[in-house]
Image (cartoon, rainbow, N blue to C red):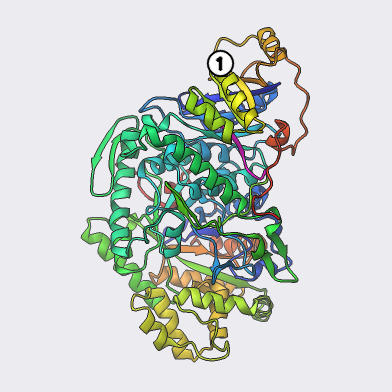
Amino acid sequence: MYIGKQLHFGLFIYPGGHHIAAWRHPEAASEQVTELDYFRRCALACERGKFDSLFVGDALVARESRGRVVGEVAINNLDPVSVCAAVAGVTTHLGVTATLSTSFHEPFLIAAKFATLDHLSGGRAGWNVVTTSQDAAALNFGRDPHMGKALRYERAQEFVDVVRALWDAGTGSVAHHGRFFQVEGSLGLERPPQGWPVLVQAGASPPGRAFAASIGEAIFAAQTTLPPARKFRADIHRLMAERGRPPHAVKILPGLSPVLGSTMAEAKRKEAELEELVHPRVGVWMASEYLHFPLYDLSPDGPVPADEVRAANPQLSPAAGAFLDRCTREGLSIAQGGRILARSRTHQSFLGTPEMLADHMQMWLAEGGCDGFNLLPPWFPGELELFVDEVVPILQRRGIYRRDYEGTTLRSHFGLAVPG
Amino acid sequence: MILTATFGSAATAGRSLADLRSLLADTARAGIDAALFVRSPGAGAPMLDGVALIAALAAVPGSIGLGAGVPVDYQEPFHLARAFAAIDRLTRGRSAVVADLAAGDDLAAAIGHTTPVGERDARRAELLDVTTRLWDSWEDAALLVDRPAGLFTDPARIHRLNHDGAYFAVRGPLNAPRPLQGWPVIVVPVRDAAAARLAARWGDVALAATETLAAEMRTQATAAGRVVRVLLDVAPGQIDAAAMRDRHASGRCDGFNLVLAEAPARLDIDRPPVPDGTTLRTRLGLPRPLSQFAV
């Protein structure tokens, strides 16, 4: 048995697929995206591929463009905790990670929700802790504008503190009196099997990184090339050390969207086929949303107006800033920029054969760029099954990926300790 | 005759998913129309999340309904609508929302705030009004999945609410398609006059603690022109098939809600078979609501 660094995999499930137009692909199960069988089929493929976890993202506002729902794209994920619980009900080993915002919920009820998920799944629950960056989400939860980023993260930290205290107390009581929450009570449930469901974080901004270093046990990262990925991972480890946490207490999984073919030519054909399916309105909408800047009335073949975008948005996210730099560097048009977003939703995309992808993953692992990947297959379930059948066996032969589960909890898959 | 079984969290906490699956299968075999998983009353009672619980049971075959207790006094309409839009589809139209009307008091210290007693009726009514409109904000025909045209949804059939009320401001639309049942079945336990009023206006099923409350609720529902199924609570150890048949025959109720800790034995009551794929609304003889936005 190879004793060395091992890869970990999450599957980021999404209605239809991660390529924005993939739902139109004849092999995408787009008619089934609200049915249990869709989730069951994807989950069973993950379990066959010995993945650590299935991951469900969240959105608290419909995808709109200038006041109307965008009809050309698939719907949002269904409610993440519901999907994760249903998946737990049809699997035996796979972790289930649900995204849930600390900005629009109460800690007591959320502690109960994840404790329930962890108990019923036999210790397979994960919570992707988000603070919700979309300002429009606040319009569905009252009259107040959304909190600023710093305040959101302060609330998130206290939220997680309260939730962990409630889990730890089990059937005993907690008395918390803080800035945001006043909680006196008990969940009345035994401590969850994992102690705490695995806490996942995805923030890339400075407050996001600090929060991830404080509470994160798995991090869904967004770096698309190796040097920044290594830097990000080293940065997180350094921030963790400052907080007295060892580096092995976290697994860092950058997103990766693979387009696979038995030859490079076939992979390229597949990618071209997908790009053909992108509705022209979709690319412009995606770029406008991503950059918080309306591009609708500009010529799609004209350049992305980087200076104007920056002037209008001094607080642009690091990921959006990197995208803008790339548009300038490569002289991309609005339509071309839109296609990049369409392909990968800004995560790393990979084009090639299963052998090439295995090489790529092995190199990232060996070079300290990651502990694994959160996979964003272009469409479901076919491209997920292709990865499981064609790439996983190569990684197993090379001794950098498990041949079977060694435990039954998400913590055991990730090699994370049960908190004391 | 409609029969539901209510399982409190004191009975379900600590049970494995395999145990709960058996409990549900045994309950279905006994001819029960719906299993309702609710929080046992009292501060500090086990806080098993009903929504997560019924989602975990979604794969159980058959047509038994799956209800989840929801602490309505602490719910945001968007979260409530979004969770049940998912659950109703994952369960193939078998879901029910059970209003937990005791949570406002029981959980006040644990959550850190509560709605003043005098305002709860108004807040609950607004919650259900906005939640049902969020379900309706996607018309049934909004989901197209038209590959050649490149349209997953029809934007003309998805609507903002722009609701601005006393307790909630919700722009909408919901970001999930309409539940298969239109709205999940709404179950209201009726232990006092306020609950009777809520059931008469918003309930599909009322679980009445007494015949007096059942009659009071029914009078109000009839006046409002609404169909509400009235089930009388039957305490553990009080199950008596002959007595239940007589009370049902007298027209005082549409059935019974058995408060249980274990699956019931098969009762000596005629239970016609229900085909798989039947929604809970159909099984209970309830109408499927049209979207308020459909024209």
In the rendered structure, the answer to whether residue A355 lies left or right of residue A169 reads right
Task: Specify the segment rendered in magenta.
Answer: B181-187
x, y percent for residue A272: 66, 80
Q: Quadrant of residue B206?
A: top right
Residue B58 in view: yes
Element on which disc 1 rests: helix
The answer to whether B260 is drawn above or below residue A99 in the figure is above
In the rendered structure, the answer to whether residue A73 lies left or right of residue B45 reads right
Q: Which residue is mark 1?
A: B212
The answer to whether A353 is drawn above or below residue A51 in the figure is below
Query: Who is closer to the viewer here, A338 or A346?
Result: A338
Q: Which residue is painted at 51% across and 45% down in the image?
A: B80
x, y percent for residue A56: 52, 55
Please check the rendered image and state whether residue B185 is part of the magenta-colored stretch, yes or no.
yes
Q: Which residue is painted at 54% across and 61% down in the image?
A: A62
The crowd level at tag 1 (other Cα within 10 Å; few <14, some 14-19, many 20+) is few
Please check the rendered image and state whether residue A244 is part of the magenta-colored stretch, yes or no.
no
x, y percent for residue B275: 78, 33
x, y percent for residue A225: 44, 77
Residue type at mark 1 is Thr
Query: Who is closer to the viewer here, A256 or B187?
Result: B187
In the rendered structure, the answer to whether residue B294 lies left or right of residue A418 reads right
Residue B23 in view: no
